[in-house]
Amino acid sequence: MNVLIVEDEKSLAREIGSFLKSENFICDLAFTGKAASEKIAVNLYDFVLLDLGLPDYNGLDLIVEARKNKVDTSFIVITARGAVEDKVKGLDLGADDYLAKPFALVELLSRINAVARRKFNSVYSDVVLGEFTMLVQARKLLWKNSEVDLTRREFDLLQYLVLNHEKVLTRHQLYEHIWGNILDDQYDSNFIDVHVKNLRKKINAYAPAAWFETVRGVGYRVSTS
Amino acid sequence: MVKLKVKLSLYNLFSKLAFTVLFIVFMPFIFERINLRQVDNDLINKREDVIRMISEIGIEPFVESDSTGVFGSFDILKEEFISLEKVNLEEDLNFIEVSVRKIDNEEITYRIINYTFKIDGQQYLLEVGKSLSSIHRTQADIYRVLLVLLIIIIAATFLTDLQYNNYLLRPLDRITGKLTNISTPSMFDKTLVNTKTTDFVKLDESLVGLMEHIEVLFRKEKDITANISHELLTPISIMRSKLENLLLTEGIGEKAGSKIEESLKTLYRLQTLVNSLLFIARIESHQYLRIETFTVGSVLEEVCDEIKPIAEDKEVTLKLDADQDLEMHDANRSLLFSMFYNVVNNAVKNTPGGGTVTVRSSLGNSSKHIVEVTDTGKGMTQDQIKNLFSRFKTTVDRRDDGHGIGLAIAKTIADFHEIGLQVISEKEKGSTFFFTFFKSS
């Protein structure tokens, strides 16, 4: 998929670019609103990651412009201002999603994937995890034919790890994804550990789950291969 | 509390009544004085008349006609009399007195002028008298009429005062009306009230001016908040992306991985702090809407569901007792969620294993609803309570206390919703946080 990263902080733009490239995206960078406007008019992008805090442009105008020119691109708005108004305005103008800085790169990826899935009307396919099967659409985890009874949060946690399989996710990345709207100083708490512990206990009651790893000192990882 | 126009009218009424009472008290005295002076003048004039008559026709017709040598004349009603008699006194008399005279077996009080004069070496005494009872009678009549008139005047002026004050102060009513029921300066009606009273025009103009000024300040604060957040969060963002990319690099060892994660943790801490301060600033500059209707019980339930796994893991019992519910109007649900979440989470954090945290929703009285969060934790000293909700003061030993910025957030949200938030605590016994919802709000 083609992605245009519109971000005046070059260092950040390159970092996002290198992450998305490693995820097999084709990335283009624009450091100014003007450059972005030209690139959007000329090239076909599946996604535009749009930072609203551009020096020469009101980022939201780029969406208006694109919509006027009937460009079929999905916009994910990124802002460090994070004001509620910005968010509402962005979504009103037709942005597909909204991310506040600073965000986790894996979170950005999962948002892009979610928008893509909506756009192309594709459904999540079931994921095989050792002896278990995750029915993503139905929000169920099965062992053979019996359902593992998970709470909403436990399922969210597992699903996020599955979506980002083979990647180590830090506790904070998990916390931010699931409880992102709750501001609290959980950065050093065992919030995630407690949920992971409960999740493990429930899964292990059926069968050992080697696919669910704790990476010492870093976080957790799910392997699907 | 009494309205200004009522106060003014009442003052007018009382001052008029006070003057009237004074008038009534002193009126008899004043009347008496005026009357007596008039009577005295009258008597002097009459004396002059008699003297003139004597000098024209001589003394004889008065004294010779009577063998007693005394001349007396009074009108039929005995209201006035004149008497003239020969006397032999050592000195001359000329004075006015009040004296009782007996005429036809009737004692009558007269005001009398006594005057002596000599004709051909013979001293005569002239007395001219006027009855005082007639004077008192007229006086009482005037008195009554005046009193009735006064009462009518006072009543009439009180009513007109009330009406006029009402009319005069109507612009003030309108101005105060504009100030009530607004929670932000932007809600203030900036159209000037129509009035010709300079004071009100000035008052209204300065209020509008002040409101505009505050609005500008609010807007500036919003801009500053936005700019600071941009300035602070952008570098955090860059560092975070770099570290996260580094962590995803193939083949980094366990040691390097955990060092990167530690750096990320520090960065998260900074991010949370900045975000928390921004969050507080945004609430304080009213960037959140209050337009939702929901029940407090539903929020408490959600908060407890969220925290329950943590409490269970610590072996802390988390109880929710929400029999009495309260419907909130014009509120922000996610903010209230944050408010309760921070306080309940704080209680669980500060309660050792085996302890209990109880969330109770109860009716205070008809005008209040109370939500209590009680823990059996280590409690706090008065000093700790004093600084509990402040943003910066507890930072020094925040880790030891276990009170993060969460409580400052809770307090800000409570203030934004006009919810009271108090704490009582006993060292080693536990603390209770009280949320007081005033039903009118």
Image (cartoon, coloured by chain):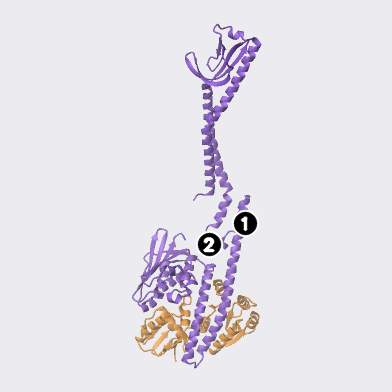
Chain colours: A orange, B purple
Alpha carbon separation for disc pair 1 and 2:
20 Å
Q: Chain of mark 2?
A: B
Looking at marks 1 and 2 on the same chain, the residue that comes earlier in the sequence is marked by 2
Q: Is residue A76 visible?
A: no
How many numbered marks, from 0 up? 2
SS for dot 1: helix
Q: Which one is in front, B128 or B279?
A: B128
> Residue at 57% across / 27% down in the picture?
B34
* Up/down of B407 relative to B238, above or below: above
In the picture as drawn, the residue positioned furthest to the front comes out as B90
* Up/down of B224 relative to A15, above or below: above
Image x and y of residue B321, in percent: 36, 68
SS for dot 2: loop
Disc 2 target residue:
B183
Image x and y of residue A198, in percent: 38, 82
> Residue at 56% across / 21% down in the picture?
B96
Disc 1 target residue:
B205
Residue kind at label 1, given as amino acid type: Glu
Q: Is residue B237 visible?
A: yes
Q: Which one is in front, A154 or B208?
A: B208
Q: Which one is in front, B111 or B159?
A: B111
Image x and y of residue A204, in percent: 36, 86
Quadrant assignment, res B341: bottom left
Residue kind at label 2, given as amino acid type: Ser
Quadrant assignment, res A26: bottom right
Q: Which mark is residue B441?
A: none
* Up/down of B261 relative to B438, above or below: below
Image x and y of residue B354, in percent: 33, 75
For this view, does B247 lie left or right of residue B310? right
In the picture as drawn, the residue positioned furthest to the bottom comes out as B251
